[in-house]
Amino acid sequence: MSAYQTLERRFARIAAISDALGILQWDTETLMPPGAADGRAEQLATLKVLSHELLTDDDNADLLADAEHETALSDWQQANLHEMRRAYLHATAVPTDLVEANSRAVSRCEMVWRDARPAGDFALLLPSLSEVLNLQRQIADAKAEALGCSPYEALLDTYEPGGNTDTIDRVFADLRQFLPGFLSQVLERQKILPDILPLKGPFPVETQRALGVRMMSAAGFDFNKGRLDISLHPFCGGATHDVRLTTRYDEADFTKALMGVMHETGHALYEQGRPTEWLGQPVSEARGMSLHESQSLLIEMQACRSRAFLEFAAPVMRDSFGGSGPAWEADNLHRLYTKVEPGFIRVDADEVTYPAHILIRYDLEKALIAGDMTLNDLPGAWNEGMRSLLGLTVPNDRFGCLQDIHWPGGAWGYFPTYTLGAMTAAQLFDAAVRADDGVMPGIARGDFSPLVSWLRTNIHAKGSLLPADELLKQATGRPLDAGVYQKHLASRYLEDA
Amino acid sequence: MSAYQTLERRFARIAAISDALGILQWDTETLMPPGAADGRAEQLATLKVLSHELLTDDDNADLLADAEHETALSDWQQANLHEMRRAYLHATAVPTDLVEANSRAVSRCEMVWRDARPAGDFALLLPSLSEVLNLQRQIADAKAEALGCSPYEALLDTYEPGGNTDTIDRVFADLRQFLPGFLSQVLERQKILPDILPLKGPFPVETQRALGVRMMSAAGFDFNKGRLDISLHPFCGGATHDVRLTTRYDEADFTKALMGVMHETGHALYEQGRPTEWLGQPVSEARGMSLHESQSLLIEMQACRSRAFLEFAAPVMRDSFGGSGPAWEADNLHRLYTKVEPGFIRVDADEVTYPAHILIRYDLEKALIAGDMTLNDLPGAWNEGMRSLLGLTVPNDRFGCLQDIHWPGGAWGYFPTYTLGAMTAAQLFDAAVRADDGVMPGIARGDFSPLVSWLRTNIHAKGSLLPADELLKQATGRPLDAGVYQKHLASRYLEDA
C-alpha cells in the first residue's frame, strides 16, 4: 500500500470518530438526561484523544513526506493530501502541555463568564480571560511558525483555512466606510414605511415544526439523511450522512424559529452536498467557516427574506396557523423580516447592523493577539466602536464586551467569518441568479432546486478541492468584493419596499 | 504507575468507548434516519476496532502478568483484574482470521435467514447456517483451550461468565421432569376460572407512555440518568450513566407494552445500581446474562404480575384510560397477565411454557457444538422436542427451528440464560421477601423501594465482584435451585386465583 493510501485509511478512521462525536454532541444538546453529563464528557474526551493520537501518530510525518513525493496523484488526491498536511500541522504545532493548559483555562474562564456576563462584571472575568488570551497568543505563535503566517492568521486558519488579514482588512475597510451613512439612510426610509402589524398567536410548537419541515423540504433538505429537533441553542451538527439541525420554539412568535430553521438548513445543504465519492476524507469537508456561513446566510438572508420568497410563503404561513387579515400579507411579513434597528446584542442584530458588531470584534481581537492592546482597555474600546459605528452608548458590559462566549471559550479568529460569510453569500447568490434565470422564479414558487443545483455544482460538491478564494473566484468570476454585498443591501433596504 | 493502575486507565478508555457505542446503537434503533445506516455502520465498526486494539495491545499480556503478582490489591481490585484477564482471554483466544470469517458468515447467514424464516425454508438456510456452526465450533475450540473448559462452555462464558453445563444440566433436568405434568394441571385449572374479559381501547400512545413512566418511577427508575423511547425491538441499552430503554406501542392493547416496559426497567435498575465507585472498570459490570435476565424477570414476572401489584395497578390503569367495569378489576387483569397457552413461538410464550422452548434449544445447541448431531437433523429434533414438552405439532419450520435469530446471528450458548434467569429471579425474590417483610406490602402499594433496596445491596452494587454462583449463594443462602422456581409457579398457577 502506498503512503498516500495508508494515510487515506487513517483519515477515514479519524472521520468515523469525528462522525461519532458529532452524533454524541447532538445527543448531548437535545436528549441526554442531565445526570449523564459527566459520563458523556468522558466519552467525548476519550474519542477526542483517540482521534488526536491517530492524527499525531509518529509515522504520519514520514507518510506525509513520502506521499508528497508520489507523482501519480490526481487533483483530488493532491488536495486531500494538502488537507491532511494542514490537519497534521494544526495538531502537532502546539506542544501538548500548552494544549492542556489552554483546555483547563478555557473551562475555568467559561465558568466565570457564566457569572460575569449577567452581572455585567468585567473585572470578575479579567483574570481568567487574561489567562486565556495569554495562552492563545502562545498557541498563535506556535502555529504561526508551523504555518508560515502571522499569529492572528494562524488562529484564523483553524476556522478559515488560508484566510489572510490583507483581504479581510480590505473588504472590512470598504464596509466601515459604507455602513454608518447607509444605516442612516435605511433608518430614515423605514420611517416612511407602513407600521409592521403584529401576528397574533399562540403558534403551537407542532404546527411550527410542521411548517419548518415543509420549508426545509422546499429548500431541498434530505430527511432520509437528517433530522430536525429541539435544543436550547440552535445548531447544525450530526454526522456526514446524518445532518441534524435544531431550533427552539416560542409559541408567541413563530417567525424567529422559522428563519432560524432556514438558516441551519443552509448549513445542512452544504453538508448534504459534499462530494459523495470523497466522504470520509478531509478533501470532502466544507471549505471553512466563511463559506459555511455563506450557505446559511444565502438561504436565510438572500433567499428566504426576499420579497419573492415571502410572496410564496405568506399564504403558507397564514394557512398553517389559521391566520387572517393584512398582518399575514407578504408586504407586512417582508417589512417584519427586514426591519433594521441598531442594538447592543450581536445575535439579535439585523442584516444591516450585524457587520458593525463584527468589525468591532475583529479589530479588537487582532490588536489583543498582536499585543497592541491590553484587556484592561477592552470595554472602553468596545464601547467606542459601538458609538462610532451604530451610534449607541453601551450602558453596561453585559450589553457590551461580555456578551459573547467566543473569547472566554478560546475561539479567537472566528468572528470575521460571520461577515465574510454574509459578503460571500451575496456574491454567490448574485452569481447564481445571473447564471440561471430559473433561480428567482423557483424561489418565488417555493422551489429552491435551481438555486441548490447551482450551489451543489459550484460550492458543495467541490468540498476542499480548492482554496476558499479560488473557489469563490471560479464560482463568481471575481475575488471577494464588498460591493456586491453593498449593492444587495441597497437594493433590499433602499429600493425594495 | 503500577501495572494494575496502567490497566485501570486502559480499561477506563475501553469503557468510555463502550458507552459511546451504547448511545450510538440506541440512536440507530430509535432515531437515526434510514439513509444514515451505512455511515453509522462505519462509525460502530471503527469504535469496535479501536476498542479491540486497546484490549489486545501487545503490552497487556505483560501488564496482566505483572499486576497478578502485585500483593497489595484489595478484593475489588483483584476481582477487577480477574475480569480484565477474562476480557483479554476472550479477545485474544480466537485468531483474527477466524473472527473475520465468522463476522462475514454471520452477516451472510442473517441475510439468508430474513428470507428463509417467512418462507419456512430450512433448506435455504442450511448452507449458510452450516458455515456459521462450523466457525462457531472452531471458535469454541480456541476459547476452550484458553479458558480451560468445554467448547460449549467456552461459548456460554461470553454471556454467562463461569457458567457450566453440570449446573445447567442438573436444574434443567429437574424442570424437564416437572413441566409436562405441571402444564396439564395448569391448563385443567384454567378451564374452571372465569373467562378473561377484553379491555376496550383504543389506548393512545401518549397515555400509554405516561402510564409506563409512572410505573417505571414507582419501580425506582432514575429518569435523571435514563430515558424511555420507542423502537421496533424493545431493549435496554445506552451507557453507564445514561440507561435508555425502549418499547413499542399498540393502540389496541396496552398490556404488552406496559409489561415490556417493566421487564426492561428490571434490566435498567441493575444497570443504574452498579457499584458507583467502580464505574468505568470491568468489575462494575453486571454479572452475566442470567443475572441480568433475572432482574428483568424479577420486576416483570415476580413483582408486576403478582396479584399484590395488580391490585395496586388496576385502578391506575383504569383511570389512565378512562375505563370502567369488571374488565378493569384486578382479578381480570391478573387472569390476563397469567394466562397460560402452549404455542410455537418463544417470544410470545407465557411464564409456564417459556422454559420448554429453552430446554429444547439448549439440548440442540449443545449437541450441535459437540458434534453429536448435524444440522440436517435439526428440524426433526426440534419438532420432537415441541411434541414431548408442549404437546404441539410444529406445522412448518417457520414456527419451529427458523424462528430465532440467535443461531444465524452467531449467538450460540445464549439460550440457557433466559431460563436460568427465570429460576434465579424466583430464588432472589423469595429471599428478598423473606429478608424484609416490607417487600410485599411495598409492591402492594406501588412502592418498590424495599425490594430494590434489597436488590441494590445484594446484587446490583456487587457488580462482578463475585462469580455468579457465589453471588447467588450469598444473597439467598443456597446455590441455584429449580425447586424455588417450581414452588413459585405452583403457587401462582395452581393456588392463587
Image: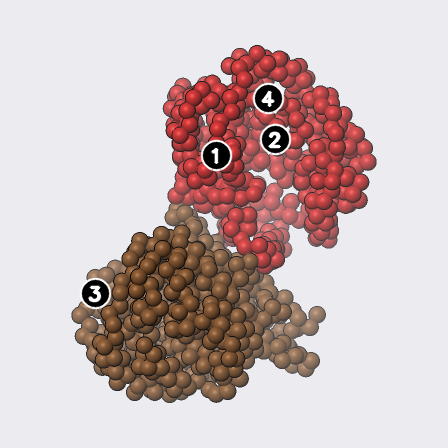
Chain colours: A red, B brown
Give the labeled residue for mark 2.
A348
Tags 3 and 4 on a common chain: no
Residue under the point 49% across and 83% down:
B434
Q: Seen in the image, is B194 located left or right of residue B56? A: left
Protein chain holding label 3 = B
**Who is closer to the viewer here, B450 or A397?**
B450
- Mark 4 and mark 1 in contact? Answer it, CB < 8 Å: no
Tags 3 and 2 on a common chain: no
Give the number of the mark in front: 1 or 2.
Answer: 1
**Who is closer to the viewer here, B249 or B469?**
B249
Q: Alpha carbon of mark 3 to alpha carbon of mark 4: how far?
A: 71 Å
**Residue B338 in the image, given as x and y percentages of width and height:** 32, 72
Residue A202, disc: 1
Assign the N terminus of chain B to one quadrant of the image.
Answer: bottom right
- Mark 1 and mark 2 in contact? Answer it, CB < 8 Å: no
Image height of A145 relative to B466, above or below: above
Q: Alpha carbon of mark 4 to alpha carbon of mark 1: how far?
A: 25 Å
Image height of B41 relative to A481, above or below: below
**Residue B138 in the image, given as x and y percentages of width and height:** 38, 75
Residue A156, disc: none
Give the labeled residue for mark 4.
A340
Residue type pointed to by label 1: Pro
Q: Alpha carbon of mark 3 to alpha carbon of mark 2: how far?
A: 64 Å
Q: Earlier in the sequence, mark 1 or mark 2?
A: 1
